[in-house]
Image (tube, rainbow, N blue to C red):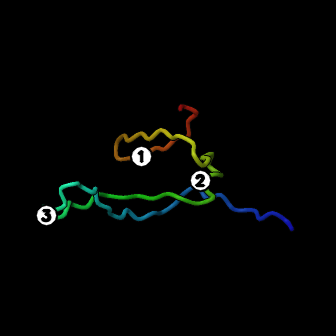
Amino acid sequence: MAAQTRTFTVRRLLTVGYSFYIHKRSHRRPPPPVPYLRLRGYWLEQAGFAVGQRVRVDVVGGRITITPTEET
């Protein structure tokens, strides 16, 4: 059986969702939502990211850059 070839797309359009930080003091009012962004897919591997690999996240001027790293 031949291996499937996946096309690597440079641009992805994602939607920022929301999540909550869970606080031990849950008897107070509900915590405010926080922005949440989940990345997954074979395209991450094609971009050089491996399962379990550490990454560096830089936030500069309204942009987020995620870089694979060999740091432990």
Percent x, y of residue 66? 49, 44
The residue drawn where x is 32% and y is 58% is: 35
The residue drawn where x is 37% and y is 62% is: 16
Q: Mark 2–mark 1 contact, CB under 8 Å?
A: no
- Precedes in sequence: disc 2 or disc 1: 2
Q: Amino acid at mark 1?
A: Ile
Report the Cα–Cα distance between label 2 and label 3.
38 Å
**Disc 1 secondary structure class:** strand
Residue 1, quarter of the rendered image: bottom right
Residue 52, quarter of the rendered image: top right
| 65, 25: nearer the viewer | 25
As drawn, 68 above or below 8: above
Q: Residues within 10 Å of mark 2 (few under 14, many from 20)?
A: few
Closer to the camera: disc 2 or disc 1? 2
Read off the residue under disc 2: 44
Left or right for 18, reference 10 = left
The residue drawn where x is 39% and y is 46% is: 63
Percent x, y of residue 41? 58, 60
Furthest toward the top, the residue is 71
Read off the residue under disc 3: 29
Left or right for 67, reference 29 = right
Left or right for 45, reference 3 = left
Read off the residue under disc 1: 64
